[in-house]
Image (cartoon, helix red, strand yellow):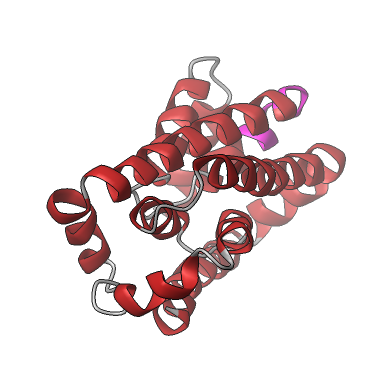
Amino acid sequence: MLRRLYDRTMGLAARRDAVWALAAIAFVEGFFFPIPPDVLLIPMVLAARDRAWLYAAVCTAASVAGGIFGYAIGWFLLETIGQPILDLYGYGETFAAFGARYNEWGAWIVFTAGFTPFPYKVIAIASGTTRLDPATFVVASVVARGLRFLIVAALLYWIGPPIRAFVERRLELVTLVFVALLLGGFVVAKYVL
């Protein structure tokens, strides 16, 4: 089943209209969706390495736009939308204490969350809630998300065929490691916040 899903994803990733799906996933991940856009970015770059930079740029722009939407949720809609999202991910109660320290280190926090598997959506909403300077949020987000997606695209562009062969030979292991990193980001976030 995993092999069929992988083959189907690679087939879809090679289509020209896949860039719209990448943009949609990156946007929604910026404020709600728990799955990072890497799940589509990676097979898209492996399927069409000549478009790696375009995919990284689209992923960055859409992710930052989603983060700005999350920031707006935190700023304007914390009680109605933001708090339920924070509660959904288990950060509701610890958020108050976190907010007091947040703005002091805001740019670094946004950069760290944007670059690592840490849930960026939580930081986007937190940034709006704590009224972190919008320019600081956007600049830190663009730098962090841009670096993250450009590094992924660059590695896949330069050493894509061996990586693709490795992924195809060890698909179950790669999937397990990816899921572990994803879940690890949420666990770390729970105990850091």
Horizontally, is 136 left or right of 69 in the view? right
Q: Is residue 45 magenta?
A: yes
Q: What residue appears at the point 68 percent right and 37 percent down from the top-left corner?
A: 46
* Res 146 quadrant in image: top right
Q: Nearer the viewer, residue 3 or 167?
A: 167
Q: Nearer the viewer, residue 27 or 46?
A: 27
Horizontally, is 138 left or right of 120 in the view? right
Q: What residue appears at the point 53 percent right and 19 percent down from the top-left corner?
A: 15
Range shown magenta: 44-51
Task: Using the image, determine if residue 101 lies above or below residue 144.
Answer: below
Q: Which residue is situated farthest in the top direction here?
A: 16
Q: Which residue is situated farthest in the bottom direction here?
A: 191
Task: Using the image, determine if residue 173 lies above or below residue 190.
Answer: above
The chief SS type of the magenta part is helix
Q: Can the viewer see residue 127?
A: yes
Q: In which quadrant of the rendered image does the C terminus lie?
A: bottom left
Q: Is residue 52 magenta?
A: no
Q: What residue appears at the point 49 percent right and 79 percent down from the top-left corner?
A: 188
Q: Position of residue 126 (x, y in %)?
A: 38, 59
Q: What residue appears at the point 73 percent right and 28 percent down from the top-left corner?
A: 53
Q: Position of residue 147 (x, y in %)?
A: 72, 46
Q: Nearer the viewer, residue 43 or 70?
A: 70
Q: Position of residue 7 (x, y in %)?
A: 51, 39
Q: Nearer the viewer, residue 147 or 174?
A: 147
